[in-house]
Image: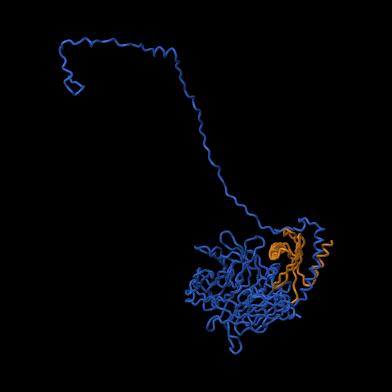
């Protein structure tokens, strides 16, 4: 229940289009999108996050990835990584 | 007697009586020694006689033969619910999920707020592709034999992969029952050694082809509607007779030329598609494929004047049971049951495939035809030649364009009869209008013929309109052919979005490459389109 509350708060923020939580294997656990789109986002962003994380560690082994943001023409994708889960939020920023 | 012995002869003398010498040597014979042979008796004392013989080998004869076999194939069906609902299956540890979210929530909310207020990216645009400013003519394709016969290009179509363009030759100004031969030509633009005067494939057709449509997913199937009212489907991959289906001349066939043909996805039969044909005899017929290469009527609609819903503004229709000639049709991209038709009477009609009422009078077709019209939009000043539904509009507010001989393009919303925007593009007839598949605010129109007041109209044959730039005049006017030759048809390439093919009355198809501002979607275009639609309705 608290999990749902937290996710609802994030989803209700201005401009947020979708929220997805995936586990360490890249399997979606909570989502506000339809299944096929969620699976697509989960797979692609999981790989990209792993790549970003290893890039940061390679440059400086003492460093660690804290947040990943991808800005595109249409929206901004934000990824908050963790050991066990990954939170993906897609926001339509105000132009 | 010969003597063999020493050569030195002289030692031995020939035998003869000799004086006896000393009696050392004397002749004598001695009895030989005898040993009795014992072997025969010994043998019988010590040996025995034995014999052996192999036993009889038993044999048997049998024959074996493999069983008769049969081929069977198995194919999985595409199931609708391919992706299962995963949320119940994944084992989630709630406590760890909760603690993760609590850790992360604050930073995410902070980022979201920062982003919302940020002006960091205002006006920042990235160019991934080379900016290409002008509209270029990439290819000028023609078939000299058809041009010699003064045939015109009546229709162009791109195939499912976007690499082949096909055009049909015929005559749009032939009034009488024409028995002229015509051609369907295809060119593969991605091939090396493309010869613009030499199509890759030429199909001879006994009657004028008025419209063409490539199959939306099978790149080699192409359907055409003929002047005689028939429909034919060709398979361009077959080297011998490419005709695979045809309607033939039956009671069901149209009695007037077929002006538009579309492929419809068949909801019931998965991969099979149905063909829809539109003709000025007032009928809209849906055909399905039969085994023997025939196309059989599956269902149909008929437009009859008295069954068209009239609003108080429209008084143009003749009363009675006259058929209303349909010249063009476009399906809504959001509701597969809704379609818009343009009629010779000058108005566009919103229709539904789910209509139940039967058309009057009962036509002599094998399948009862229904009257599909639901709403009549306000008319043009002349016959409508082309309608096109926007592929972009969300929600219920569907938009479509219609153009006709009055040189105007009307932008309609399906909810109201008055057009949202009415543009006088030229004084000439407009033959075709199409929405761009990538930019929601762009459309193209093809014009030609008619009296042109040179002071007024923009010289050009193909107009590209961009609502973002101006809602009054075209962004680009392209002159297709020297002189006053009308352009009859145009099609955007949905796969290679820069290409636009246009066919004209001189028998040439020109493939235009559009500049990048026509092919790259701006960030808020769909919203702009909605805004445009809603601000005009208010």
Q: Which of these two is toward me, B503 or B523? A: B523
Q: Reply above or below: B76 against B32.
A: below
Which image quarter holds the N terminus of chain B? Answer: top left
Query: Splitting the image into 4 quarters, where does residue B466 fall?
Result: bottom right
Q: Residue at x 48, y 76 (%)?
A: B149
| x and y percentages locating residue A37 in the rendered image | 71, 64
Determine the image quadrant of residue B112: bottom right
Residue B358 percent across, percent down from the top left? 69, 68
Q: Decide which of B538, A2 is in the foreground and name it.
A: A2
Q: Is residue B20 visible?
A: yes
Q: Position of residue A33 (x, y in %)?
A: 75, 65
Q: In the rendered view, does B29 fall on the left or right side of B481?
A: left
At 51% across and 76% down in the image, what residue appears?
A: B151
Task: Specify the farthest residue to the bottom.
Answer: B455
User: Could you tell me how many numbered marks the image carries?
Assistant: 0
Which colour denotes chain A? orange
Query: Which of these two is toward me, B109 or B479?
Result: B109
Chain B colour in the picture: blue
Quarter of the image where the C terminus of chain B is located: bottom right
């Amino acid at each position: 229940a608290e999990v749902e509350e937290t996710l609802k708060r994030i989803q209700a923020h201005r401009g947020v289009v979708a929220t997805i939580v995936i586990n360490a294997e890249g399997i979606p656990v909570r989502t506000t999108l339809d299944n096929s789109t969620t699976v697509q986002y989960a797979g692609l962003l999981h790989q990209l996050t792993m790549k970003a994380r290893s890039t940061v560690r390679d440059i400086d082994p003492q460093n660690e990835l804290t947040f990943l943001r991808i800005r595109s023409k249409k929206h901004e994708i934000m990824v908050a990584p963790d050991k066990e889960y990954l939170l993906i939020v897609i926001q339509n920023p105000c132009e | 007697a010969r003597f063999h012995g020493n050569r030195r002869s002289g030692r031995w003398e020939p035998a003869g009586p000799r004086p006896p010498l000393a009696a050392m040597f004397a002749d004598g014979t001695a009895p030989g020694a005898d040993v009795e042979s014992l072997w025969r008796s010994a043998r019988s004392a010590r040996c025995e006689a034995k014999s052996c013989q192999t036993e009889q080998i038993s044999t048997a004869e049998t024959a074996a033969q493999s069983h008769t076999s049969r081929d069977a194939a198995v194919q999985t069906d595409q199931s609708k619910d391919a992706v299962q609902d995963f949320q119940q299956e994944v084992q989630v540890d709630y406590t760890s999920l909760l603690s993760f979210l609590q850790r992360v929530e604050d930073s995410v909310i902070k980022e979201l707020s920062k982003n919302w207020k940020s002006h960091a990216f205002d006006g920042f645009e990235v160019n991934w592709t080379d900016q290409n400013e002008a509209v270029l003519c990439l290819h000028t394709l023609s078939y000299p034999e058809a041009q010699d016969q003064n045939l015109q290009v009546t229709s162009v179509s791109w195939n499912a992969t976007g690499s082949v363009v096909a055009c049909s030759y015929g005559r749009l100004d032939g009034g009488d029952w024409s028995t002229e031969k015509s051609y369907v030509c295809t060119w593969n633009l991605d091939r090396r050694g493309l010869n613009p005067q030499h199509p890759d494939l030429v199909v001879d057709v006994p009657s004028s082809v008025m419209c063409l449509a490539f199959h939306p997913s099978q790149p080699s199937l192409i359907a055409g509607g003929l002047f005689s009212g028939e429909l034919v489907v060709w398979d361009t991959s077959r080297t011998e007779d490419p005709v695979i289906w045809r309607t033939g001349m039956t009671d069901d066939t149209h009695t007037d030329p077929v002006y538009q043909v579309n492929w419809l996805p068949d909801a019931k039969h998965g991969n099979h598609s149905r063909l829809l044909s539109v003709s000025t005899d007032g009928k809209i017929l849906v055909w399905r494929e039969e085994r023997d290469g025939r196309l059989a009527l599956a269902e149909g609609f008929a437009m009859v004047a008295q069954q068209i819903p009239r609003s108080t503004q429209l008084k143009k229709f003749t009363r009675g049971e006259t058929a209303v000639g349909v010249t063009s049709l476009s399906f809504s991209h959001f509701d597969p049951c809704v379609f818009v038709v343009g009629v010779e009477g000058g108005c566009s009609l919103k229709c539904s495939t789910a209509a139940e009422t039967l058309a009057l009078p009962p036509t002599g077709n094998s399948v009862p035809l229904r009257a599909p019209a639901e709403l009549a939009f306000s008319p043009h000043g002349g016959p409508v030649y082309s309608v096109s539904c926007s592929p972009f509009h969300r929600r219920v507010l569907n938009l479509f364009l219609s153009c006709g001989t009055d040189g105007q393009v009307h932008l309609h919303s399906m909810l109201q009869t008055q057009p949202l925007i009415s543009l006088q593009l030229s004084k000439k007839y407009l033959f075709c209008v199409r929405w761009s598949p990538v930019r929601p605010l762009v459309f193209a129109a093809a014009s030609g013929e008619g009296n042109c007041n040179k002071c007024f109209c923009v010289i050009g044959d193909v107009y590209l309109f961009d609502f973002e730039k101006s809602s009054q005049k075209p962004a680009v006017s392209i002159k297709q052919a020297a002189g006053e030759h009308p352009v009859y048809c145009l099609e955007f390439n949905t796969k290679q979005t820069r290409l636009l093919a246009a066919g004209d009355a001189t028998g040439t198809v020109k493939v235009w490459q559009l500049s990048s501002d026509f092919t790259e979607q701006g960030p808020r275009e769909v919203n702009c389109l909605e805004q445009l639609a809603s601000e005009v309705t208010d």
